[in-house]
């Protein structure tokens, strides 16, 4: 499922707030939260889109890759559930 992001006034502040919250979480918690989103799917709520954008950037910061895809800065999609491999500081997709 995909979400088409249409920017609104105040979005940057909300995304930054989510980013700050993610930075206080463990990597395992971040992965667990992503998997919760992947399980429920994208429901089309704007606030969820902002949450997923923030999560995408947090994954890029921690792993240099993300299980979320953002195409053309507007289409957000989830690639599926992942597992955190702590000893390698990476994640892999679950079949």
Image (cartoon, helix red, strand yellow):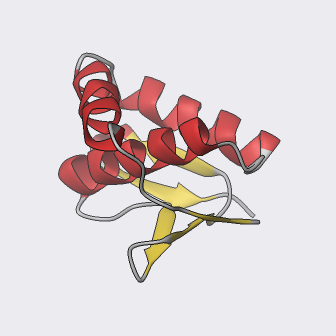
Which residue lies at the image location 23% right of the left edge and 63% below the top edge? 64
Which residue lies at the image location 40% right of the left edge and 61% below the top edge? 66
**Camera-nearest residue between 94 and 10:** 10
**Camera-nearest residue between 66 and 73:** 73
Q: Quadrant of residue 77?
A: bottom right
Which residue lies at the image location 51% right of the left edge and 59% below the top edge? 92
Report x, y in % for residue 43. Answer: 78, 46
Report x, y in % for residue 93. Answer: 59, 61
Horizontal arrangement in the rendering, residue 87 relative to residue 37 (left or right): left
Which residue lies at the image location 47% right of the left edge and 71% below the top edge? 74
- Note whether 53 is above or below 80 in the view shown: above
Quarter the C terminus occupies? bottom right
- Note whether 38 is above or below 92 in the view shown: above
Horizontal arrangement in the rendering, residue 4 relative to residue 73 (left or right): right
Report x, y in % for residue 55. Answer: 40, 43
Horizontal arrangement in the rendering, residue 9 relative to residue 93 (left or right): left
Report x, y in % for residue 6. Answer: 50, 61
Horizontal arrangement in the rendering, residue 6 relative to residue 20 (left or right): right
| Residue closest to the far bottom | 72
Quarter the N terminus occupies? bottom right
Label count reads 0
């Amino acid at each position: 499922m995909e979400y088409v992001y249409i920017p609104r006034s105040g979005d940057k502040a909300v995304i930054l707030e989510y980013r700050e919250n993610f930075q206080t979480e463990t990597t395992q918690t971040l992965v667990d939260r992503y998997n919760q989103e992947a399980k429920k799917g994208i429901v089309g709520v704007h606030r969820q889109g902002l949450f997923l954008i923030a999560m995408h950037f947090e994954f890029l910061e921690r792993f240099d890759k993300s299980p979320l895809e953002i195409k053309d800065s507007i289409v957000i999609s989830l690639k599926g559930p992942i597992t955190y491999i702590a000893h390698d500081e990476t994640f892999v997709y679950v079949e």
